């Protein structure tokens, strides 16, 4: 099939999800507010002083990102449930990997948007003065998000037809992302504190991204095939 | 060889066996109506032919492509409109059709899409999200996909339900044109009289097998 | 499956014998001069930990084989392997915790090995839950196979955790430059229990796969029976 | 309407949801293991030492409870989406408050079950020796859960009907959970450390519960009416 | 005064005005069929009568209760079966009916429930979750609610769609019995011929107003 057609189909799937969310203002706003609620809880619960806050920052950010994206993932396939479920998508004549990439792109965009808003907010809320590192922090966050959303969309597809799928999705995603989470937390800690290791954790992050994103479309096609 | 051939097709959902050796073959330009009581397996058969369900046992070929290996080629050549409309509530009619076209690799022609929306009488609503459409309006839009391309095979599951009198007339005219151009139609319906003057063959699904529909009582 | 039926009885008998011998050696071995009787937990902990890892490895292997060959046998083995693995993982965690109380003064510590074993238990539970939650058996088989393979990254992490990170937990003691290598009197009971646990794992796997196979078979037979009733 | 009929209807709504979870099996154990996974994530993210752990415990527990009950809440109205949405429920001739109470009871039951399992587990895993306080801790947790699930069911109802008017309301209501969480965290901290304030936070918790549970059925009836 | 009276009923969705002064009154034992093209507002009118939609302007009374204040009393006296079946997929047919009965404050009589399931020919499936039922089986179960009590008013939205020939016969017989016992039926349908010998009155919904259906062309 010509590449152009595949690209157009990928774009269209992503477009549909993003436009849908935009029109209903559903996922984005609930993700953002959820993230803020989590931050507030952490702030109240831990009430860290300034030095502690710098130490806890990577963990805070990653935990919030993880739970927030979990919330977004629960909705990735919700639009498909409206009238006939995934069925309609699966009748498309483009290869199924394309559907995966479209879904992934849409989810990635939303998650990244939330992260971009979340990061400065966290710095303000926890009163941590690392604004100079902001671009680098964003970089690490994005790197981790690539793999996280890739794996997440795959798992969401897997559990889409399952019973009580939200619980299941969360149950499966958390243990699988644990290595990614460790690498992300450590890399960010390395950024904030030069005495800590950075390079090898970054490399690990990249490896995870590549592996998940290479395997996922293939696994997706497999899973949804009847 | 016939354009569509189904041989000894079986299907069971877990412990419940629904199809039990279905045989069917269709030629270009042919229209067949599937009859059968509620739960007899009509929708299941259509789902198998649309490749939505995996062939468990038996063979199904469309234009020489086999469902077991070449699902994509088959999907490329068919259109399925079932009980569900597969429309996205937050998109407008035009956007819904464009979505369908892109996912079927059809060339993007805004004029064709607009014409299809107009043909089913929805131009007044072309800027509104589909979510609040009435049952018949949704059905019309789902059927409008037929105007976007000429598939080999058209699978319809109770296409007349929810359509008003004009809707039925429009559908029959479109089916007529489609058949003339060599398409094949297989539809499940409880009310074959709605086809009116459209030439068609009746098939009855009973105990998991297909037989000629006219032979038996009209039940 | 026929092969499994044949070896089932000898395997069970052997397992019982080996466990008997192993337990006898464990109970008669002298108490450790440092750890006292607590050391006897070692003879359960170490073999079950190894078996837990082996089970996950086995599940990954048959999952890959299933995706490649698409034969139901591999899926049955995977389903059984998950159940057996979850049991061994649980025993590992429980015995480790019981041992940890006198040794480290706490039931639990968040070091890398302990955490990664806990993650493995969650993975096993996730695999079971996923299979339960999907109605279509073939879909369930594929999904669990893919998931098991993705989750296999946890295996090297568990094994090398004691080397990569500074941990509370014992480093590998049969090989390597470890100072606290297991030697002397400890060795015979440990070897005997290891053999017994390998046999136990195999026996459990065979029993469980036969149960799974029988359940699936029964469903097929039941179909015919119901159909005849309703004809 | 006779009380018996109202009670039967309440029971039936709760029963439907609980039975649904039960038949889909594994929901409870999935939720429990999800909660454990959340604890693992926190550990990986924050890596607290023993003393820190005691201080962080209330926050950890409440954050975990929040995530877990959020998972449950996502499902509360999922069953209603199947064929016709809430509509079917709204045609019932019992007062709408009854529907709310039924939904709330079903959700409460599951959440409380998970909490009862989660609490001792957290104490073991984080090695915090406050077993003597266990009943009191459970008490505080339950008290907070009452209001949290009440508010949560209301929010879920709003987002379920998902018209922009109501999404907006949901966004306004979401911050309301924050005060409840703060009160819960502080009350628990007060339990663990006698030097901190306890009584007034407990009073606040009770007030929140009463207010939310009194207002919620009324707000629910108002919201779902067309 | 008539048992059901609708006076000058208006309804608009945002800027889109659908009903524009509907007048209707019905007596006990009467059956009326709503005709009208797709999107003419039939389902909207039924939703208003079922109290699912709030009355924006005009009056609607059932047995003397007014929709504006006494919605609960009205809901207590009517049964609505629409495009959607309002069934729960994880429950069995029996459990679905029991759920309905409890939420309508009907006395719990297991025998009645079982009899209703059997009457629509689903006893074979009485232990299976409804999730996988075929379209017609779902529709039958949704209509079986009629056998649980004798409401004053029965609102049906295209009740015949998805039903097979036996299903239609069963429904007509049940409606007949229901009418004889003094119930009122108001149904929207594109195919009033399905009512066969059932005495009924035709109403046409056009430009937001009701008129006698026989006057105009059958479109
Ligand atoms: C809940 C707590 C524990 C868990 C989850 C755990 C887990 C494991 C695992 C997975 C292994 C096998 C590693 C491999 O083969 O790569 C292992 C081996 C071992 N464990 Fe533990 N353990 C725990 C507590 C303890 C305690 C408290 C002790 C004693 C102080 C201990 C002593 C050992 C020893 C001596 C080995 C054998 C080392 C080797 O040969 O590699 N463990 N444990
Ligand atoms: N909630 C809503 N919001 C906005 N518009 C709506 C809503 N519900 C219905 N409409 C619009 O009101 C009009 C009437 O819809 P209705 O469903 O009543 O038609 P109908 O007569 O039942 O048609 P059909 O024969 O197709 O079922 C349609 O144009 C529809 O788009
Ligand atoms: N996914 C599924 N799992 C289990 N059973 C199913 C599934 N899908 C359908 N069935 C069962 O298969 C049988 C045939 O269903 P199908 O939908 O094909 O019937 P149908 O002929 O289309 O009926 P109708 O005229 O009511 O639409 C029914 O008894 C149904 O309960
Ligand atoms: Mg059907
Ligand atoms: Mg309608």
Image (cartoon, coloured by chain):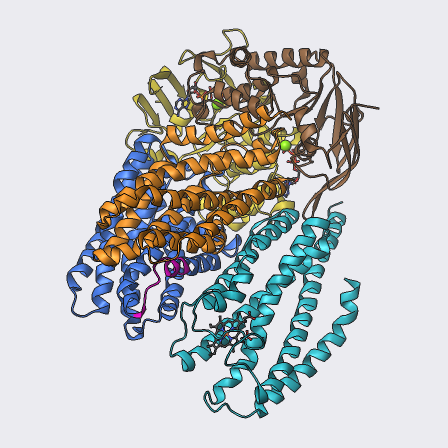
Chain colours: A orange, B brown, C cyan, D blue, E yellow
Please determine whether, in this image, residue D201 is positioned above or below residue A210: below
Q: Main secondary structure of the magenta part?
A: helix
Q: Position of residue B197 (x, y in %)?
A: 70, 11
Residue D40 vs residue B190: left or right? left
Measured along the vertical axis of the image, is residue C98 above or below residue E7? Answer: below
Instruction: List the single residue furthest toward the right.
Output: B1
Which residue is most to the top? E216
Estimate the x, y position of residue E75 in percent, counting from the top left. Answer: 38, 35
State the residue in front, E21 or E39: E39
Image quarter in which the C terminus of chain C is found: top right
Q: Quadrant of residue D196?
A: bottom left
Location of residue C218 in the rendering, given as x and y in whole percent from the top left corner: 72, 57
Residue D159 in the figure: left or right of residue C193: left
Q: What is the number of callouts on the image?
A: 0
Image location of residue E57, percent across then percent down: 29, 20
Camera-side residue of D205 and B147: B147
**Bounds of the magenta segment:** D39-50
Which quadrant does the N terminus of chain C fall into?
A: bottom right
């Amino acid at each position: 099939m010509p590449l152009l057609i595949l690209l157009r189909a990928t774009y269209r799937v992503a477009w549909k999800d993003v436009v849908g969310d935009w029109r209903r203002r559903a996922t984005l706003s609930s993700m953002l507010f959820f993230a803020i609620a989590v931050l507030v809880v952490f702030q109240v619960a831990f009430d860290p002083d300034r030095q502690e806050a710098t130490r806890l920052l990577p963990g805070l950010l990653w935990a919030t990102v993880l739970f927030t994206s979990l919330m977004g993932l629960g909705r990735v396939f919700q639009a498909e449930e409206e009238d006939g479920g995934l069925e309609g998508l699966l009748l498309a004549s483009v290869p199924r990997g394309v559907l995966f990439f479209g879904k992934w792109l849409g989810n990635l965009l939303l998650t990244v948007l939330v992260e971009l808003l979340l990061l400065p907010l966290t710095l303000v809320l926890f009163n941590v003065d690392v604004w100079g590192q902001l671009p680098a922090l964003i970089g690490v966050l994005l790197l981790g998000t690539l793999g996280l959303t890739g794996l997440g969309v795959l798992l969401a597809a897997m559990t889409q037809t399952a019973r009580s799928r939200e619980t299941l999705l969360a149950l499966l995603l958390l243990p699988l992302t644990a290595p990614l989470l460790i690498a992300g937390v450590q890399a960010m800690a390395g950024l904030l504190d030069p005495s800590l290791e950075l390079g090898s954790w970054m490399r690990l992050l990249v490896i995870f991204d590549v592996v998940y994103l290479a395997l996922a479309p293939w696994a997706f096609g497999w899973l949804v095939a009847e | 060889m016939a354009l569509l051939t189904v041989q000894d097709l079986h299907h069971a959902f877990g412990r419940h066996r629904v199809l039990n050796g279905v045989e069917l073959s269709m030629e270009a330009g042919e229209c067949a109506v599937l009859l059968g009581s509620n739960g007899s397996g009509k929708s299941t058969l259509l789902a198998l032919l649309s490749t939505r369900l995996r062939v468990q046992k038996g063979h199904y070929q469309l234009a020489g492509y086999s469902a077991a290996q070449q699902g994509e080629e088959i999907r490329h050549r068919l259109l399925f409109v079932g009980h569900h409309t597969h429309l996205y509530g937050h998109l407008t009619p035009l956007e819904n059709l464009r979505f369908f076209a892109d996912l079927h690799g059809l060339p993007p022609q805004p004029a064709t899409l607009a014409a299809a929306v107009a043909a089913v009488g929805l131009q007044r609503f072309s800027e509104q999200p589909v979510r609040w459409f009435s049952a018949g309006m949704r059905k019309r839009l789902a059927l409008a996909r037929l105007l976007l391309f000429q598939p080999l095979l058209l699978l319809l599951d109770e296409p007349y339900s929810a359509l008003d009198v004009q809707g039925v007339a429009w559908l029959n005219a479109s089916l007529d044109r489609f058949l003339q151009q060599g398409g094949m139609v297989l539809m499940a319906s409880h009310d074959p009289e709605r086809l009116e003057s459209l030439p068609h063959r009746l098939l009855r699904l009973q105990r998991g097998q297909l037989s000629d529909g006219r032979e038996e009582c009209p039940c | 499956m026929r092969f499994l039926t044949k070896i089932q009885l000898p395997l069970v008998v052997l397992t019982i014998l080996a466990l008997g011998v192993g337990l006898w050696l464990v109970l008669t071995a002298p108490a450790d001069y440092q750890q006292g009787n607590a050391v006897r937990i070692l003879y359960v902990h170490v073999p079950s930990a190894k078996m837990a890892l082996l089970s996950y490895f086995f599940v990954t292997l048959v999952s890959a084989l299933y995706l490649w060959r698409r034969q139901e046998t591999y899926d049955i083995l995977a389903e059984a392997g998950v159940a057996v693995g979850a049991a061994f993982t649980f025993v590992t965690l429980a015995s480790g915790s019981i041992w940890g109380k006198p040794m480290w003064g706490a039931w639990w510590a968040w070091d890398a090995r302990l955490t990664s074993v806990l993650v493995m238990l969650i993975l096993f539970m996730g695999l079971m839950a996923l299979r339960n939650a999907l109605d279509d058996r073939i879909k369930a088989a594929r999904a669990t196979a893919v998931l098991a393979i993705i989750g296999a990254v946890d295996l090297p992490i568990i094994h090398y955790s004691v080397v990569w990170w500074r941990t509370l937990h014992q480093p590998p003691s049969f090989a390597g430059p470890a100072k606290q290598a297991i030697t002397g009197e400890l060795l015979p009971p440990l070897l005997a229990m290891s053999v017994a646990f390998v046999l136990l794992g195999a026996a459990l796997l065979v029993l469980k796969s036969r149960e799974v196979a029988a359940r699936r078979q029964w469903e097929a037979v039941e179909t015919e029976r119901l159909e005849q009733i309703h004809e």
